[in-house]
Amino acid sequence: MVEVTVYKVVVSRDGAGWLADVPSLAGAHTQAGNLLRLDEAIREVIALVEDLPDGAEPALMLAFEYEGLDEVAARAVDVGRRRADFDLVHAELVDETMTVARRMVSRGWSVRDVAHLLQISPGRVSQIRAQSRELLNPR
């Protein structure tokens, strides 16, 4: 099993800019004017400190912790994390819905019954059925 390193990144405000520090890596800190640039910069710093191969930055797993934010910004962080969690659950639900719909249709269930049970439109079930046929019978 491949061990994935998750780097804890502590982020704080510095006037109008942002600071990032990776406590587990000596010398791994940087600053930037906005959070998008800060993310890019801290990935570059981690790659340099860890002597990672060129191009490794996008694949790094980062866990951001924010310090010293006001109430509104702290709430924004919470909302963002909840949205990311929701997006993950939604993607899993879409995959599971497609899997179940394919199995039911392949066992002879009607499009309408499958749609009703899964709480999706019959049109969507028909699309899933068509995609399944294309996968089984590529041109």
Image: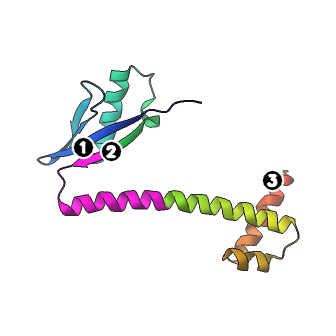
Q: CA distance from mark 1 to mark 2?
A: 7 Å
Q: Nearer the viewer, mark 1 or mark 3?
A: 1
Q: Residue furthest left?
A: 15
Mark 1 = which residue? Answer: 11
Asked where in the image residue 76 lies, by quadrant, the reply is bottom left
Depicted 50 relative to depicted 92: above or below: above
Mark 2 = which residue? Answer: 64
Asked where in the image residue 99 lies, by quadrant, the reply is bottom right
Q: Secondary structure at mark 3?
A: helix
The reply to whether callout 1 and callout 2 are in contact (CB within 8 Å) is yes
**Residue 2 in view here:** yes
**Residue 122 in view here:** no
Q: Secondary structure at mark 1?
A: strand
> Mark 2 is on which residue type?
Phe
> Mark 3 is on which residue type?
Leu
Magenta-highlighted residues: 64-86
> Mark 1 is on which residue type?
Val
Q: In the image, what residue occupies the spot 27% across and 28% down? A: 28
Colour scheme of the rendered structure: rainbow
Foreground pick, 34 / 66: 66
Specify which label sits upstream in the sequence, 1 or 2. Answer: 1
Q: CA distance from mark 1 to mark 3?
A: 46 Å
Using residue 116 as the reference point, say whether residue 10 is left or right of it: left
The reply to whether callout 1 and callout 3 are in contact (CB within 8 Å) is no
Q: Main secondary structure of the magenta part?
A: helix
Which x, y percent locates residue 130? 79, 64
> What label does residue 135 carry, if any?
3
Which x, y percent locates residue 19? 20, 40
- Classed neighbour count for the residue bearing mark 3: other residues with Cα under 10 Å, few (<14), some (14–19), many (≥20): few
Query: What is the count of numbered marks?
Result: 3
Specify which label sits upstream in the sequence, 2 or 3. Answer: 2
